[in-house]
Amino acid sequence: MTTSRTAALSALNDIDPSLIPGVYRIENTSPAEGTAMVVDMLRSVYPHEQIYGDYVTVQDYVDCPPRQLYDYLAQTRSLEEWTGSLRGFTETDEAGLWLAYDRMGNDQTKIYTRTVANHEAMTVDYHCAWDQGAHLWMIYLIRVVDAQVVLDKPGSVVLWTNCRHPFYDHNPFPETAPADRTTWVGDLWDMFAAGHLIELHNLKAIAEYRHANGLPVTPEWMQ
């Protein structure tokens, strides 16, 4: 028995297309229709809220071997070097949980950080929170990619994404905040993209300098 190529496809055969009208595929959208949709979505200027309202992603190339860069980022204390304001990291009594101070809030704003890293995938996720360490809801997602694979040259590509957790809009633990602090981390959300790009450029400058000068990308004091 011969089965047609279309009939043999299993993709989306379990759902009536009328139930998901927002899905556009070559099976229900002609190339001309698809091109018209894409062109209609393009803008010369995009509203800040449309691009950075719920997610912030920054990326850059770093002239440093990916594994060395990953190993550096996987050290929580590296944040003291390349971030703009996290300082004074000390490990708490809870293994893997670090306490530092975010000078962006004020000198008394504590920030707690736990680093969740995957050696094989070269992902480094920083789970953080201002003021308290019981619920780490500020998640910084970082992936290091081998530039040889994606750009055909040695080095690394760093992808960094933040998601707008609801707690950015209100402080869920006001009782743990310093009494004299007037700024909440979520007040700064509109500046996250620019601020994180500055920090990514810091990371790039530090890693590239050490690599170019034969220095360990991760200094001994971090290891």
Image: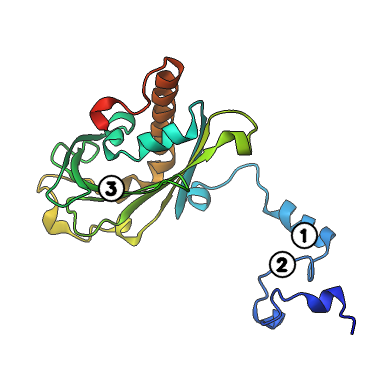
The secondary element bearing badge 2 is classed as loop
Name the residue tied to disc 1: 34
Judging depth in this view, the residue of 81 and 42 nearest the camera is 81
Q: Nearer the viewer, mark 2 or mark 3?
A: 2
Q: Position of residue 144 (x, y in %)?
A: 48, 40
Residue 215, placed above or below residue 164:
above
The secondary element bearing badge 3 is classed as helix
Quadrant into which the N terminus falls: bottom right
Do the residues bearing badges 2 and 1 touch, measured as CB atoms within 8 Å? yes
Q: Is residue 47 left or right of residue 128?
A: right
Q: Position of residue 27 (x, y in %)?
A: 79, 70
Judging depth in this view, the residue of 185 and 147 nearest the camera is 147
Residue drawn at (80%, 77%) of the image: 8
Q: Point out the residue furthest to the left here.
A: 179
Name the residue tied to disc 2: 24
**Which amino acid type is marked by label 2?**
Tyr
The secondary element bearing badge 1 is classed as helix
Residue drawn at (34%, 61%) of the image: 166
Residue 18, placed above or below residue 127:
below
Name the residue tied to disc 3: 185
**Which amino acid type is marked by label 3?**
Val
Q: Residues within 10 Å of mark 2 (few under 14, many from 20)?
A: some
**Which amino acid type is marked by label 1?**
Gly
Instruction: Tell which circle, 2 or 3, labels the residue nearer the N-terminal end.
Output: 2
